[in-house]
């Protein structure tokens, strides 16, 4: 009789450990914390799948609910109302820029005639999740505003499933153009020579795409002077780069999950996922994908040997007929900034690109760094050998990671010296 609770506890412990445990590379520090975080995401995703299957809620909307509940639980502070928080000097206002909701963080005014720096931020979350007003994004933007004496504008662009490409991009572009207008810069006392665009993950994709568009827009009198991209998503032609293969099972961004985010963003059928996993969508059969376009995402030429290891490129001779047509926007540079030509890249602002070794998107970032450099743009690439996708957002107890704090510190230091 007395053994039963012990046996039950043991059984439960084994079951939990089995659910939580994932093998991780030795270089990843605080592995159990990452496993717990991953188990949280997995549970949310399984719950969402179940709810979607029962017809109770959209998959993405129930994930949002779980992650918001989760964030609320761990932070407990609910920084979602403007003015709340730990930086009393920073003024926070929720307003709109050209009809797009934004949150503006203003450091204390520096006196008459004193100009400040500006930074526009696009949050990550696979173009489907997250908010600049919640969780660590709010905390990071307050910190940047306070420490760098910078006006930060965080953009609440629309997300999937409410909209898909190009609307999230167009929201960001409209907000950016409004921000860069001489009247708005004057209103916030921002130096037009010192305005940055930045974002992480899907937000890094939007930042890179918006930076390109503004760079080639002859009517834009003020342009971004720098771009800071944190593990950006940059291309959808090759899901078999060395980093996609090496890190396909590393939490928290699994390879099929990133492909799903792409299909959602581009408004394509989610059942295409297995075909994209094997690069069927970019087979040689598709004449619209010219050799020139392919060379722009060719990791065999663009990556340093250290990252290529013994991986082999996967170029499919003959994929399923018409597949490229079923993925609208596949070749649109506004969705895949890595596809832009050298003449566009040459006009782009100086770049900071943060990459993590244990991230399917590592090679997207490394290839973009190389191509910008080849086009004559100055690039700083901070590569975290022990980094994983998302670490930049995990800086608050109890889900704080040392590598996340170092990554954030490196980002802020670069902005301090270069913006
Ligand atoms: C990829 O395309 C080939 C050629 O059409 C097809 O035989 C194969 O089943 C496709 N792979 C997947 C995973 O759909």
Image: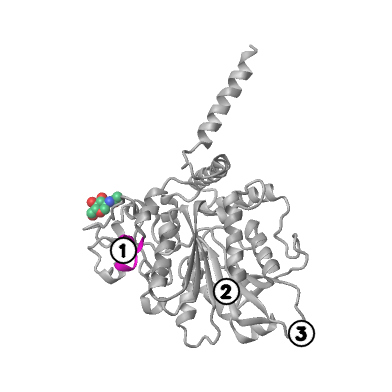
| Mark 3 residue crowding within 10 angstroms, few (<14) / some (14–19) / many (20+) | few
Q: Quadrant of the C terminus?
A: bottom right
Look at the numbered disc 3 and say if its residue's Cβ is closer than 8 Å to ligand 1: no
The residue that mark 1 highlights is 301
Q: Residue at x 61, y 64 (%)?
A: 412
Q: Position of residue 335 (x, y in %)?
A: 43, 68
Look at the numbered disc 1 and say if its residue's Cβ is closer than 8 Å to ligand 1: no
> Tag 3 or tag 1, which sits nearer the N-term?
3
Q: Residue at x 60, y 52 (%)?
A: 394
Q: Position of residue 131 (x, y in %)?
A: 60, 61
Residue 31 in the magenta stretch? The answer is: no
CA gap between label 1 and label 2 equals: 30 Å
User: Secondary structure beneath disc 1?
Assistant: helix
The residue that mark 2 highlights is 196
The residue that mark 3 highlights is 112
> Tag 2 or tag 3, which sits nearer the N-term?
3
Asked if residue 205 is positioned above or below residue 348 in the image, the reply reads above
Asked if residue 70 is positioned above or below residue 225 in the image, the reply reads above
* Residue 406, picture quadrant: bottom right
* Residue 344, picture quadrant: bottom left
Q: Residue at x 39, y 61 (%)?
A: 268
Asked if disc 1 and disc 3 are in contact, CB closer than 8 Å, the reply is: no
Q: Foreground residue, 321 or 231?
A: 231
Q: Residue at x 41, y 51 (%)?
A: 255
Relative to 46, 416 lies left or right? right
Q: Position of residue 327 (x, y in %)?
A: 36, 63
Per the rendered image, the range of residues in magenta is 295-303
């Amino acid at each position: 009789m007395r053994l039963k609770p012990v046996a039950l506890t043991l059984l439960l412990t084994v079951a939990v450990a089995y659910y939580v445990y994932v093998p991780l590379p030795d270089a990843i520090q605080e592995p159990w914390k990452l496993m717990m975080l991953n188990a949280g995401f997995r549970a949310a995703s399984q719950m969402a799948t179940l709810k979607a299957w029962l017809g109770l809620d959209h998959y993405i909307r129930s994930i949002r609910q779980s992650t918001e509940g989760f964030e609320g639980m761990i932070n407990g502070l609910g920084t979602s109302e403007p003015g709340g928080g730990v930086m009393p000097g920073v003024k926070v206002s929720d307003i709109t820029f050209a009809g797009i909701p934004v949150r503006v963080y203003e450091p204390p005014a520096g006196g008459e005639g004193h100009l400040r720096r500006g930074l526009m931020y696009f949050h990550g979350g696979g173009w489907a999740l997250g908010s600049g007003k919640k969780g660590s994004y709010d905390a990071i933007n307050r910190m940047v505003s306070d420490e760098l004496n910078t006006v930060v504008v965080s953009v609440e662009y629309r997300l999937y499933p409410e909209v898909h490409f190009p609307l999230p991009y167009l929201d960001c572009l409209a907000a950016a153009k409004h921000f860069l207008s001489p009247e708005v810069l004057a209103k916030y006392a921002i130096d037009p020579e010192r305005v940055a665009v930045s974002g992480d993950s899907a937000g890094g994709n939007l930042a890179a795409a918006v930076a390109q568009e503004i760079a080639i827009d002859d009517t834009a009198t003020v342009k971004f002077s720098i771009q800071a991209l944190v593990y950006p998503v940059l291309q959808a032609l090759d899901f078999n780069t060395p980093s996609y293969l090496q890190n396909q099972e590393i939490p928290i961004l699994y390879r099929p999950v990133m492909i799903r985010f792409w299909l959602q963003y581009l408004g394509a059928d989610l059942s295409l996922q297995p075909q994209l996993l094997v690069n069927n969508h970019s087979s040689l059969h598709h004449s619209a994908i010219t050799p020139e376009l392919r060379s722009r995402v060719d990791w065999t030429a663009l990556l340093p040997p250290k990252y290529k290891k013994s991986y082999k490129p996967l170029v499919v001779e003959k994929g399923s007929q018409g597949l490229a047509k079923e993925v609208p926007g596949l070749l649109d540079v506004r969705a895949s900034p890595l596809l832009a030509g050298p003449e566009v890249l040459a006009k782009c602002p100086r770049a900071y690109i943060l990459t993590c070794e244990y991230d399917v998107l590592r090679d997207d970032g490394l290839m973009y760094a190389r191509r910008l450099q080849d086009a004559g743009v100055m690039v700083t690439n901070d590569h975290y050998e022990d980094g994983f996708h998302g670490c930049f957002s995990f800086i608050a107890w109890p889900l704080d990671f040392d590598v996340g704090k170092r990554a954030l510190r490196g980002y802020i230091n670069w902005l301090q010296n270069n913006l």
